[in-house]
Image (cartoon, rainbow, N blue to C red):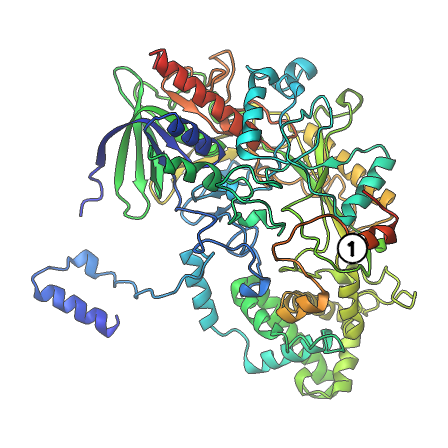
Amino acid sequence: MNTFQIKEAPTVYDVAIVGSGAGGGMAAYQLTKAGAKVVLLEAGGYFDPADPKYITQLKWPYESPRRGAGTTRPFGDFDAAWGGWDIDGEPYTAAKGTEFFWFRSRMLGGRTNHWGRISLRFGPDDFKRRSLTGVGEDWPISYEDISPYYDAVDKLVGIFGSKEGIRNEPDGFFLPPPKPRLHELMLKKAATSIGIPVIPSRLSILTKPINKDRGQCFYCAQCGRACQAYADFSSSSVLCIPAMKTGNLSLINHAMVREVLTDPNTGLATGVSYVDTISMQEKTVRAKTVMLAASTCETARLLLNSKSSRFPNGLANSSGVIGKYLNDSTGASRSAFIPALMDRKRYNEDGVGGMHVFTPWWLDNKKLDFPRGYHIEYGGGMGMPGYGFGGGIEGLNGRIPGRNGQKKSAGGYGAGLKDDYRRFYGAYIGMAGRGEPVPLESNYCEIDPNNVDKYGIPTLRFNYKWSDYEVKQAKHMQDTFEEIIHALGGIALGSKPGPESNHGYGLEAPGKIIHEVGTVRMGNDPKTSALNKYQQTHDVKNLFVVDAAAFPSQGDKNVTWTILASSWRTSDYLFDQVKKKNL
Amino acid sequence: MKRRDTLKAISLAGFGLAVEPVEAAVPAPPEKKTVVPGGRQPFEAERDTKLKAEKFFTPHELQTVTVLCDIIIPADERSGSASQAGVPAFIEFMMKDQPRNQTPMRGGIRWLDNKCVAMFGKQFAQCTKAQQIQIIDKIAYPEQASKDMTQGVSFFNMMRNFTAAGFFTSQMGIKDLGYVGNTPNDWQGVPDDVLKQYGLSY
């Protein structure tokens, strides 16, 4: 059998979309609903959160021989993301002295199957950071341009939250938020007392039904496992599967796209070539328009690998900007033990998947020594025990008076130790800051000149270092965490991460927060951006990017809601252009 | 090559379908018959099956682990012991699943046995209960341990953490802990009596 014989499907689709995550899913949904014939290529397998073949929701830790440890899945056996930072046969590298961790999820819906459902709108200031602070970049659009799409996403996908009237944390169309858990009420009281706001979370989870196709949250706290009732947002359940029901979508799984194909005469995109990862056959599909939503780094890789005599630096890269300005959220965390929560009364405290309250950015950077803000996410409660339960108790139980009021020696064994685990259950809290970095030209991904993946596709090499802006922000996070812990009457666990720790103050390595954006950024100037304000490439008019690669910056807001809104906006624009016969 | 594979190869050749030399140089992979349980990827199911078929602990090591687990989490009025909850099997699996655990575990058992032979003339598992507790008391309290016991402290910390994780993620341990979730419900907030206890309200 000659595997190098390229199989070409005879159909010419209206649109070929690469990637089925938030951006690709939304484009597929909007375009198929509007009647376009769409082919959706996904590098991984089929996934439906409601199919028992895939369900991990409501399973118990003892149903896993490793009790849910993260051996083959970074977030544990029950997490819905297939893949991770390391995928067999799909390597990447980092230039010396730099690092980046690249999380990929090879499945229908991509990383949306397991994400935190934290669905924050960017605020008006988030689109104008350069004008406001002198560093970073402005977007070619404003909050007013995108807010109708945020509204539409709120209504289509569903989100809970509360109207707060905070200028740079715009309110949306919210379902009722779940009431805070006990530790969240305590956090709110403590943080508020020292001037740090705590408000209801904004998560894309249905606390009320919104249509007949999706159920209502039944409070198992397991959104990370993907919801069989479709009560949270995953691109698979909420966008891709409904798009298939229109009859206008051809989904091709196991399609690892190699290149965007172009007509050497017109320079227009004509489709894509891909490897069928099961049969290892080389195939192509033809389409009148190509939309890339393969994820920030994968989209950049695909364009850089789509070289031709007409596009020697990669497709749509006359600016040379593709791969540059890669930026991930900052992250730093701390945990604490709350003695007041020992010996708690037991009740079902699962709630929704994730926190019921959070702290939006509350300070003015003009008065601080770093230019961007962060929000704080909170963890804790009487959750389902998992791998690692009780770990490190020897660092804690010597500091806590026993039932008789006397302190005992740390560590130990036997009936007394067994009782400690019971007493301490539900008395831990965690805090994690998620902040906005300043996008830098010097942080980028490029094609590795020496390496290919198992399909023979040249891989990425990363060049990424945090700057002082992010390190100072992490320092501020650590100070804030200690203030909150103190106000709570808690005992901070471990020692405070200082300048020497990790990347400074416990700052996580780039890529660890999995919010990367920016490699194919949009802008008004074709010399410094690859996309126009509709996320259409400056160089190839029938080629669009609808994932977070398009974003010049990311706020301290997790970007999924903005991916959904901007992909919808681009889909509308595409339809309008087709109607006007510009495409 | 399994017998049936050989037969298959012969029958193919018999029908005149030549097996090219390059293909014949690499034997066909064994037939995969792993059942993939719900929620697992095929490679994960195959990996689990393979690991479960392997043995890491020697009978002596397994006996030592079992004694240690039950010293760490013994049975009491509320629930059974660590070994009754299946903790040794869990630890055995984790050695194979995450091989970085193997040297600290195997070496730690060896360290313990050597100390016991020096002190009591017998390996740990063969010591009397009183002797076992005598050595455990030297390694179970990190802040009080003497300098010649620090490796033992690290080993016992590892055992303690594995035992707790294994016990409290078992059916028995979850019941003991009083975790009552992982079931569909309608969250209406913290119960009133609990709010009152903590002086909080909505």
- When the figure is inspected, residue A512 is found, relative to residue B153, above or below; the finding is above
- When the figure is inspected, residue A420 is found, relative to residue A457, above or below; the finding is below
For disc 1, the marked residue is A427
Residue A473's image quarter?
top right
Task: Give the secondary structure at mark 1.
Answer: loop
- When the figure is inspected, residue A315 is found, relative to residue A411, above or below; the finding is above
Q: Is residue B118 left or right of residue A223?
A: right
Residue at the location (47% across, 34% down)?
A295
Q: Is residue A41 left or right of residue A78?
A: left
Residue at the location (73% across, 43% down)?
A179
The quarter in which the N terminus of chain B is drawn is bottom left
Q: Which chain is disc 1 placed on?
A: A
Relative depth, front residue between B21 and A211: A211
The spot of residue A207 in percent (x, y) is 62, 41
Q: Is residue B118 left or right of residue A438?
A: right
Q: Is residue A361 left or right of residue A405?
A: left
Question: Type of residue at label 1?
Answer: Ala
Q: Is residue A520 visible?
A: no
The quarter in which the C terminus of chain B is drawn is top right
The spot of residue A88 in percent (x, y) is 43, 50
Instruction: Sort mark 1 into few (<14), some (14-19) or many (20+) by Cα contacts within 10 Å.
Output: many
